[in-house]
Amino acid sequence: MQKHEEKLDQHKEDIEKHEQKIKQQQNDVEKKNEDTKQEQKSEEPAKEKPSEEKPSGDKPNNEQPKVQAPAGKVVYLTFDDGPHAVSKDILKLLKKYNAKATFFMLEPNMKNYPDAVKAMVNEGHTVGVHGVTHQVSKIYRSPASFVGEMNQAIAFIQKTTNVQTHLIRAPYGSKPYVTAPFKAASDKEKMILWDWNIDSMDWKLTNGQYVDKVIQQTKQFKSKDPLIVLMHEKPTTLANLEKLLKYYKDNGYEMKALDEAMIPVQFK
Ligand SMILES: [Zn+2]
């Protein structure tokens, strides 16, 4: 018992460190992109910044999705980097608003909160994976390491819940790291890679401003793609989540979980 608690504390520290690192890296990407901004639709990596990915209002959307978003207003809430101690409270809120969501999780966190993973499945949410290390130098070292981390996390979900998921989300999004060889390797494993088109920036906007940011992007959304909102399983996200759920409910949106038949939204 004691040991377990120590482990948990240690883990919390690790998460803190991990998040600092994520912040630093995202800041770096952000800086890089200040200079090179939008305009060019280049294939060059690091130009397209995941967190700035706009709901393609200013991009021609020539590729009609084969599966149209269902009639009526639907939004797909997604949560990365969990599970976390706040998972159970996130689930409680989702239930209160009759909302389903999708969770892209890291294997070490699932090991720490296996009950959260089970609860997600039992309550009708969709579970997907986000790898193991969340470290650029490790997961993106090679296509094999990318696929290996995803498979390791997939195996944990399988073992824990009996669900065989194919849904993956690349740490920091598919641009710039998931180049053609990485994509080919994950395609070969039948993995379905999901990016997003509404970035809450909740990792940065820890005082609740992320909610307004999501609402604003929702109002401006013009693409025919499904609305995919990126959030994280964090205490500061939970603290303001109800306001967002209330907005979607009051405005007639159905909050649904991703399913594997959908054509995934991916950065172009
Ligand atoms: Zn992440």
Image (spheres, rainbow, N blue to C red):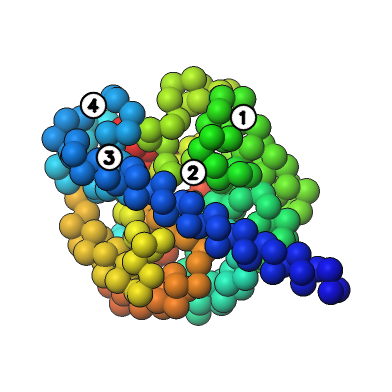
Mark 4 to mark 2 CA distance (whole Å) = 21 Å
> Is 199 displayed left or right of 61 in the figure?
right
Closest to the observer, 161 or 131? 131
Question: 21 above or below 181?
Answer: below
Locate residue 149: give its quadrant.
top right
Q: Earlier in the sequence, mark 3 or mark 4?
A: 3
Q: Which of marks 4 and 2 is nearer the N terminus?
A: 4
Q: Which of marks 1 and 3 is nearer the N terminus?
A: 3
Which type of secondary structure does the marked residue at label 1 adopt? helix
Question: 212 above or below 168?
Answer: below
| Residue located beneath label 1 in the image | 145
Q: Which residue is drawn at 70% across and 49% down?
A: 157
| Residue located beneath label 2 in the image | 171
Residue 229 location (% of width, % of height): 37, 56
Location of the C terminus (image quadrant): top left
Using a 10 Å C-alpha cutoff, classify the residue at mark 3 as few (fewer than 14 neighbours), some (14 to 19) or many (20 or more).
some
Q: Which of marks 4 and 1 is nearer the N terminus?
A: 4
Can you tell which mark lies on residue 42? 4
Can you tell which mark lies on residue 32? 3
Q: Residue at x 30, y 71 (%)?
A: 209
Which type of secondary structure does the marked residue at label 2 adopt? loop
Using a 10 Å C-alpha cutoff, classify the residue at mark 1 as few (fewer than 14 neighbours), some (14 to 19) or many (20 or more).
some
Which type of secondary structure does the marked residue at label 3 adopt? helix
- Judge depth for marks 2 and 3 and give the one in front: 3
Mark 2 is on which residue type? Pro
Mark 1 to mark 3 CA distance (whole Å) = 26 Å
> Is 176 displayed left or right of 139 in the figure?
left
